[in-house]
Amino acid sequence: SEGSGGTGIRLYRSRWLMLAILSLLAMLSDWICFSVAPIPGLTMLAYSGVHPASLVTLFLSTNVFFCLFEPLIVKRHGLRETVVYGAALMAIGCVLRSGLPGFPTTSASVVMLGTVFVGAAQPFFQCTPALLAATWFGPDERTLATTIAINANQIGIALSYICGAYLVHDV
């Protein structure tokens, strides 16, 4: 791992950076998915009666569907590009779900479309940690790397409930 010159150190840092990016994207993905769950009344007021359970179900259904395509995309484009594609899908979904500063989204159908985009992105972060660990980490680091990335999803869910319950008080 520690090669001659600075090459080994750069590789060491870049794999941990990739793990951090993958983990943060996985955390954000689940945070976005469950962000409306702790505030059902406000969600239904803001988005014309759309129930948070419908958005979570739409997200998870889209996630399952795109999990079927994730291995093909990784095989064709590699891990780095797959994660970049996922990040782009998630960014588009976030803009659709929330709008831009000063121009919030109020349309239920646009929120649902944004949810589809974010749900489509999640497999690119959720299904790739083991591949990242197997490809870029040594045998003694693989379990730690996989555990960090996989547990980021649960941290995102926890943050959605903490932030939603304590920070969101009106539409």
Image: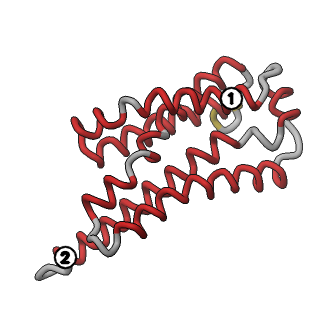
The answer for how far apart the CA atoms under marks 2 and 1 are is: 45 Å
Vertical relation: 128 (above or below) 69: below
Does 120 appear above or below 1? above
Tell us which disc is closer to us: 2 or 1: 1
- Sequence order check: which comes first, mark 2 or mark 1? 2
Label 1 element class? helix
Relative to residue 50, is residue 97 depicted above or below?
Answer: below
- What is the quadrant of the N terminus in the image? bottom left
Q: Which mark is residue 7?
A: none
Q: Position of residue 80 (x, y in %)?
A: 29, 48
Residue located beneath label 1 in the image: 55
Residue 121 versus residue 106: which sits nearer the camera?
121
Q: Which class describes the residues within 10 Å of circle 2: few (<14), some (14-19), or many (20+)?
A: few
Residue in view at x 54 percent, y 34 percent = 118
> What is the number of the mark on residue 8?
2
Using a 10 Å C-alpha cutoff, classify the residue at mark 1 as few (fewer than 14 neighbours), some (14 to 19) or many (20 or more).
many
| Horizontal arrangement in the rendering, residue 110 relative to residue 130 (left or right) | right
Residue 96 in the image, given as x and y percentages of width and height: 60, 29
Q: Looking at the picture, which amino acid does disc 2 mark?
A: Gly
**Image side of residue 12 versus residue 18, left or right:** left
What residue lies at 17% left-to-right and 79% top-to-bottom?
Answer: 6
Residue 121 percent across, percent down from the top left: 47, 36
Between residue 160 and residue 128, name the one nearer to us.
128
What secondary structure is marked by label 2? Answer: helix
Apparent side of residue 69 relative to residue 166 in the rendered image (left or right):
left
Residue 100 position in % (x across, y down): 63, 35
What amino acid does circle 1 point to? Leu
Give the quarter of the figure containing the C terminus: top right
Q: How many marks?
A: 2
Seen at 31% across and 65% down, the residue is 15
